[in-house]
């Protein structure tokens, strides 16, 4: 769970950095170069690992949730007042939202690339992601959904980051507080980073 | 002061239980929570009703026998406090107080507020010890232990085995309980010898008992009456991975 | 008359145990597997005995009334465990630990037993350290010690204020190891209700399964009682509420002599009674008297807030009366001194039944941090219970019933007068005389369990290697079970109106008033009569709701209270018989002009072992004379 999570968190950084290139004022050249790089065979291996990581993370998440649910067959009548962070309480729920997002996200881009979905008119070929994205983001409903999903992703990461370290036993009286701060910064960076892209294309971009 | 108690009543492990309401008058704020229940029970007995069954023994917060889920928290609203140390001065006149047993598949209810915690016992039977025979110990000071480590081991060793960590955890996980013992022994030189085998056996037993998995919400730490840190869970995780990766194959 | 043979070996004191041990018979490993031993009680004594016997290869069945052995009341011992390691280079030695214990016990303990306990104390510390018990340490990594009441050396090993918990968990861990190996089988949630004797030997017990209510027969080749003390006879005491006398009492009724029942320690530093529904007095460790100073106002009935009473208006009465030991006088002396001040009208608090224990000077001298490190958890505990912060205000304390030096009479082998029935730890009488020194109880319990009993029991079992399994369908088992069943039916059928606790409360009050810290013949006789009356009421007006075929905590309590009437009477009987003051036993008629205890060594240097003669029948006393060959009997002075 934690290992897959860490891999996914690393992936998110590279994904975000790539996406942010869309915002570059070069008409998307840098972004296209980056996308080209992703076609490299070495990256393919990473891609398969990525799919595996998603699968493991999601499957384990569901299995653990089921086991945990079964571990308390009779619930408390009085709602628990044990103070725990809201984010940690709703990891499964934020996880589901992110999963829904992921599915739509894959339909929009990955299916197109695999030829399972028709190529949008705006795109020149199946790897021409930027026009596809721009078209989607200019739909306020889609952008809104995207931004909200990113918010939940941020919540998920806020807990997930330090939780992964805890689960792997990587804690230390000196460094754990720093890990917690870095985790928060990371979560903000990822969720805000992704969210500004649709906001930019929705409000500040005219083709 | 007067309070209204809503208490889980269940005849035995086989029957279904339900909440019953007991208005209780003239409760002294100086009473401990359990003395308040004694007071209720005395009235119930005088009326010819069956008293509420709950477990307790030392009444000074060290034996770990007592444990009630009071108004949504194990051992009630105070931190670092067992049920028996809780006093009625922490409640308001007219307050409604829900009293429930620990809820977990691994802690089946035996009667009213009494649960069976033998799953905890079996985790300890698995390997909660240092294998040393009586008479085989070296002179005590021949094994120096750093004061810092000894103090940390003590912080883990203060676990009273009450089960509040399981009751508090949204997953009913027993990680803090197991981790406290694993950590105590893994840190000190006497316990390092068999640390890898120990953590493996104890974690396996814990999983077999039907506790949930840890999702690092730290509810256990928040409600542990002895203030045991969830850092020990990380330490157990580390020990566990190191046992899995570097430990020898066991039969 | 049964003749008491203590079987104390010949030879010089320091060599008695090693020589005797060398002569004890052994049981071969192959035969040990065939021998079963029942251990009742899983406190420090029981858990250590069960694990040590398991390690040797015996088949052990261990019983406790709690849901886990870890909850036995040894867990509540706070201050520490003594050993003669001399790590502080303060000229401590086995002899000095022995001497302090004999003197602390006011010359009413057996020399040979006490010396042996001191001798094995060092092994106990080594063993606990190897078991991972987190004792306090110095920065160099070696074990730290502190001093305790009644001694002038620093020999007490400790783990903050939770030494008992940590030692018990150490013993519990060794017990768990034997459970894992299959050598010990645990029977938790069982009350022992009777002892079974076949052909003159203890061969089993009858227990009630506290969950199902079933009566069970368990057999073994020997039975070990490690059932603790009977301090809950006072109702309000420092003991766990489940602690009781019933197991030991059932053995007494079956013929085991009960020694010095009136020797019951009143601990000087417990949190005083705060409300009418209180059922428990919480102990504040004696170690607090290392740094805390005990005082009361000099003015009678001074109700000012303690922090408003200036230094020169405080009476540090322990320092005044006992300059050599000051606040660290033994428990009996400290308790009586507190009672004396309170009875004279100087007591603190609304009830006037408490004295101050003040840390102001210690905090000023050493800093709050140092005090916090030493006593942090005790201070927290005090604040939780009373709502008062002891860092800024003195604690209020008062004596409370605590530890029973009396118990089943045992010989040097720790065997009672019933062959095959052993008693260890607090449940026997042997090592503390008329008063126990602080931190000696953990020492004795673990010494008995780990290092003494496993040796002596083999000598007894050596005769049993051909016996084979003891069947439980024999007549004595049937009879014992029948008797228990009848008793339960009888008590369930009373159908009165009052709870067992209400009787226990009254009983406790009678005992505290008439057989407590200060006793006199008239009061003791009156106490006995009052017990008789209350007992009659009990058997008429008790009410136990529910059935006996399920968890029934009222039934459990009632069975214990029923025995306490008899225990209480025997305590009074013993206290009447002992026309002297010694240790915890203080007779008003026998005191010096300055109010100190006056012992009578000429007539009372003996152990009074009582034989049960039937319900309400006068018990018969047997006397085991005490010989002091290695210490000179002196007036016990802490001045």
Image: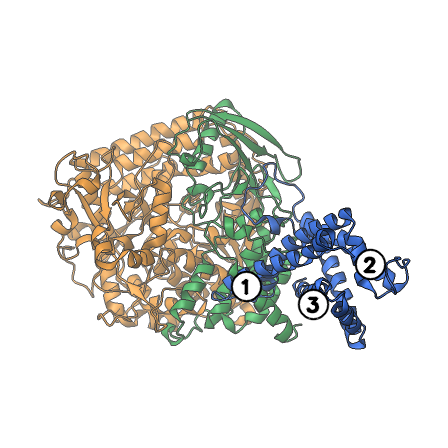
Chain colours: A blue, B green, C orange
Q: Position of residue B48 (x, y in %)?
A: 52, 24
Q: Residues within 10 Å of mark 3 (few under 14, many from 20)?
A: few
Comes first in the chain, label 1 or label 2: 2
Q: Residue furthest front?
A: A206
Residue C185 can be seen in this image: no
Comes first in the chain, label 2 or label 3: 3
Q: Label 1 vs label 3: CA separation?
A: 20 Å
Give the number of the disc on residue A14: 3
Residue B147's image quarter?
A: bottom left
Residue B176's image quarter?
A: bottom right
Give the number of the disc on residue A132: 2
Residue A84 can be seen in this image: yes
Q: Is residue B133 left or right of residue C271?
A: right
Chain letter, disc 1 residue: A
Q: Is residue A73 left or right of residue C98?
A: right
Taking depth in this image into account, of C365 and C458 the one nearest to the observer is C365
Q: Which structural element holds mark 3? A: helix
Give the number of the disc on residue A179: 1
Q: Position of residue C42 (x, y in %)?
A: 47, 54
Front: mark 1 or 2: 2
What residue is drawn where x is 42% and y is 50%? C73
Quadrant in which the N terminus of chain B is drawn: top left
Front: mark 2 or 3: 2
Q: Position of residue C203 (x, y in %)?
A: 50, 53
Compared to C284, does C510 lie above or below?
Answer: above
Residue C339's image quarter?
A: top left
Q: Label 1 vs label 2: CA separation?
A: 37 Å
């Amino acid at each position: 769970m934690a290992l897959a999570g860490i891999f996914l968190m690393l992936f998110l950084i590279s994904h975000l950095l790539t996406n942010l290139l869309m915002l570059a004022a070069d008409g998307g050249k840098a972004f296209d170069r980056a996308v080209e790089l992703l076609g490299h065979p070495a990256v393919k291996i990473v891609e398969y690992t990525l799919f595996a990581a998603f699968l493991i993370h999601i499957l384990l998440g569901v299995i653990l949730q089921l086991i945990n649910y079964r571990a308390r067959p009779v619930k408390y009548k009085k709602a628990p007042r044990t103070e725990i962070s809201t984010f940690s309480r709703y990891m499964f729920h934020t996880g589901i939202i992110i999963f829904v997002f992921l599915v739509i996200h894959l339909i929009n881009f990955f299916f197109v690339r695999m030829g399972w979905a028709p190529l949008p008119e705006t795109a020149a070929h199946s790897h021409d992601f930027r026009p596809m994205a721009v078209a989607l983001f200019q739909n306020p409903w889609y952008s809104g959904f995207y931004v909200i999903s990113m918010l939940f992703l941020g919540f998920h990461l806020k807990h997930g980051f330090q939780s992964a370290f805890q689960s792997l036993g990587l804690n230390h009286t000196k460094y754990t507080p720093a890990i917690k701060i870095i985790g928060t910064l990371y979560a903000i960076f990822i969720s805000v980073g992704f969210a500004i892209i649709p906001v930019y294309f929705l409000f500040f971009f005219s083709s | 002061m007067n309070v209204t108690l809503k208490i889980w009543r269940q005849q035995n492990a086989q029957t279904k239980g339900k909440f019953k309401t007991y208005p209780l008058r003239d409760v002294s704020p100086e009473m401990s929570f359990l003395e308040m229940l004694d007071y209720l029970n005395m009235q119930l007995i005088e009326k010819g009703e069956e008293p509420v069954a709950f477990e307790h023994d030392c009444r000074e917060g060290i034996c770990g026998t007592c444990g009630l889920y009071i108004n949504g928290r194990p051992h009630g609203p105070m931190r670092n406090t067992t049920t028996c140390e809780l006093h009625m001065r922490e409640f308001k006149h007219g307050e409604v107080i829900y009293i429930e047993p620990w809820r977990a598949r691994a802690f089946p209810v035996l009667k009213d507020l009494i649960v069976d915690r033998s799953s905890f016992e079996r985790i300890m039977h698995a390997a909660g010890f240092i294998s040393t025979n009586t008479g085989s110990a070296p002179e005590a000071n021949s094994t120096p232990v750093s004061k810092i480590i000894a103090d940390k081991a003590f912080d883990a060793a203060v676990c009273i085995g009450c089960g509040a960590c399981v009751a508090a955890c949204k997953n009913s996980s027993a990680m803090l309980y197991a981790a406290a013992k694993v950590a105590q022994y893994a840190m000190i030189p006497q316990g390092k010898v068999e640390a890898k085998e120990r953590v493996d056996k104890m974690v396996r037993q814990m999983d077999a008992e039907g506790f949930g998995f840890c999702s690092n919400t730290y509810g256990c730490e928040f409600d542990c009456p002895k203030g045991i840190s969830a850092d020990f869970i990380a330490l157990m995780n580390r020990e566990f991975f190191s046992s899995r990766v570097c430990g020898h194959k066991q039969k | 008359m049964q003749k008491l043979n203590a079987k104390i070996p010949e030879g010089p004191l320091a060599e008695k145990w090693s020589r005797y041990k060398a002569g004890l018979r052994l049981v071969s490993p192959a035969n040990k597997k065939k021998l079963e031993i029942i251990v009742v009680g899983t406190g420090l004594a029981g858990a250590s005995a069960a694990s040590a016997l398991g390690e040797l290869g015996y088949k052990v069945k261990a019983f406790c009334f709690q849901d886990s052995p870890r909850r036995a009341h040894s867990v509540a011992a706070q201050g520490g465990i003594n050993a003669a390691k001399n790590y502080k280079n303060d000229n401590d030695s086995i002899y000095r630990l022995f001497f302090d214990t004999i003197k602390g016990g006011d010359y009413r303990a057996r020399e040979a037993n006490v010396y042996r306990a001191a001798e094995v104390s060092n092994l106990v510390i080594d063993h606990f350290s190897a078991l991972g018990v987190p004792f306090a340490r110095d920065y160099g990594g070696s074990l730290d010690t502190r001093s305790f009441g009644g001694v002038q050396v620093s020999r007490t090993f400790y783990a903050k204020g939770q030494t008992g918990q940590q030692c018990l968990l150490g013993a519990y861990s060794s017990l768990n190891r034997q459970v894992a190996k299959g050598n010990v089988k645990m029977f938790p949630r069982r009350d022992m209700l009777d002892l079974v004797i076949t052909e003159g030997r203890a061969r089993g017990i009858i227990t009630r399964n506290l969950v199902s209510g079933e009566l069970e027969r368990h057999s073994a080749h020997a039975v070990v009682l490690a059932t603790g003390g009977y301090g809950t006879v006072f109702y309000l005491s420092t003991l766990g509420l489940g602690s009781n006398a019933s197991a030991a009492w059932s053995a007494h009724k079956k013929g085991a002599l009960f020694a010095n029942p009136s020797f019951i320690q009143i601990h000087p530093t417990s949190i005083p009674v705060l409300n009418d529904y209180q059922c428990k007095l919480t102990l504040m460790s004696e170690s607090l008297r290392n740094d805390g100073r005990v005082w009361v106002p000099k003015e009678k009935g001074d109700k000012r807030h303690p922090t408003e009473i200036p230094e020169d208006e405080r009476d540090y009465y322990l320092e005044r009366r006992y300059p050599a030991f000051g606040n660290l006088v033994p428990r009996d002396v400290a308790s009586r001194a507190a009672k004396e001040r309170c009875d004279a009208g100087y007591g603190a608090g609304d009830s006037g039944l408490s004295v101050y224990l003040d840390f102001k000077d210690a905090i000023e001298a050493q800093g709050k941090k140092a005090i916090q490190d030493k006593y942090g958890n005790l201070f927290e505990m005090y604040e939780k219970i009373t709502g008062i912060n002891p860092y800024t205000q003195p604690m209020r304390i008062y004596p409370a019933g605590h530890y029973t030096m009396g118990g089943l009479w045992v010989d040097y082998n720790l065997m009672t007068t019933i062959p095959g029935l052993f008693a260890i730890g607090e449940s026997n009488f042997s090592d503390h005389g008329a008063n126990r020194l602080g931190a000696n109880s953990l020492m004795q319990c673990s010494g008995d369990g780990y290092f003494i009993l496993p040796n002596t029991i083999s000598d007894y079992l050596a005769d049993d290697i051909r016996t084979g399994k003891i069947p439980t369908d024999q007549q004595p088992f049937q009879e014992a079970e029948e008797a228990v069943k009848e008793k339960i039916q009888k008590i369930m059928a009373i159908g009165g109106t009052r709870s067992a606790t209400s009787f226990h409360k009254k009983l406790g009050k009678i005992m505290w008033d008439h057989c407590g810290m200060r006793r006199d013949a008239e009061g003791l006789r009156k106490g006995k009569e009052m017990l008789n009356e209350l007992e009659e009421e009990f058997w008429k007006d008790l009410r136990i709701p529910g059935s006996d075929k399920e968890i029934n905590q009222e039934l459990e309590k009632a069975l214990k209270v029923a025995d306490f009437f008899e225990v209480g009477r025997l305590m009074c009987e013993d206290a009447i018989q002992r026309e002297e003051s010694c240790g915890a036993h203080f007779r008003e008629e026998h005191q010096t002009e300055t109010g100190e205890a006056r012992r009578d060594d000429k007539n009372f240097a003996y152990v009074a072992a009582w034989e049960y003669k039937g319900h309400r029948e006068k018990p018969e006393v047997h006397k085991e004379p005490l010989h002091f060959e290695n210490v000179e009997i002196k007036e016990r002075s802490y001045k």
